[in-house]
Amino acid sequence: MMNLEEILLQAASELGFDNYQVIDTAAIQFEERFRMYCEMNYCGNYDSNYSCPPACGTAKELEEKAKQFQRALVLQTITPVKNIMDDSETKVIKRRHNQMTWSLIDRTSAQVGACLPAMAGPCQICSPCAKEQGKVCPFPEKKASCLSAFCVKVDALAEYCGIPYYCDGEVAFFSILFFHKK
């Protein structure tokens, strides 16, 4: 019988993630100053998506939520791109990465129990987000903030896991599933 970590790693493999690894949450570096990138609103979701700042909570609050879980499944996809600066191309790839992450969560939820996902980019379940329309989030259980909102130092995470961060001619997306050790 497989333990929880083996179940998660097998699911990651079957779903087609390029790299995946279970680590201690304590190994993840959080850098609160990264929140300024959210506040600069490069992605256009600041204060217009429930999963993004300021609605998702402070950097410190998200870090504290993550640190309530002892273990973290780091997931990565690497995809060739024609132009890494073409937002329309990378958004499709990012959406696929996040859908793969949700598939993994759905597939393993009975074994994992309580968990906290951190995605590649903002929640994309509703388009536009209910926040933009002044409505309550219809899927609060599926709302997941991105690694930027959590202020995860992704380059250090990649280095720690021994997986690529910079990929020439390719885009690498990351997500994390924080979970309790069983």
Image (cartoon, grey):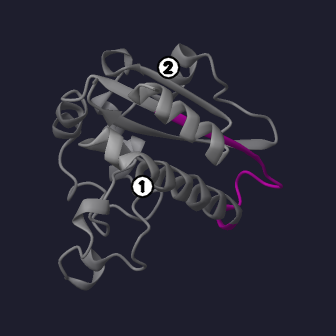
Q: Which mark is residue 156?
A: 2
Cα distance between the residues tagged 2 and 1: 28 Å
**Which quadrant of the structure image shows residue 180?**
top left
Q: Quadrant of the C terminus?
A: top left
Q: Is residue 52 above or below residue 3?
A: below
Front residue (pair 33, 68): 68
Q: Secondary structure at mark 1?
A: helix
Quarter of the figure that contains the N terminus: top left
For image coordinates 44% across by 31% down, the residue present is 73
11 over 156 or under it: above or below? below
Q: Residue at x 25, y 33 (%)?
A: 66
Q: Is residue 9 left or right of residue 117?
A: right
Q: Which residue is mark 1?
A: 106
Q: Reply above or below: 144 against 8.
A: below
Residue at image location 31% in from the left, 57% down from the top = 52
Q: Which sits in the foreground, 41 or 72?
A: 72
Numbered disc in front, either 2 or 1 = 1
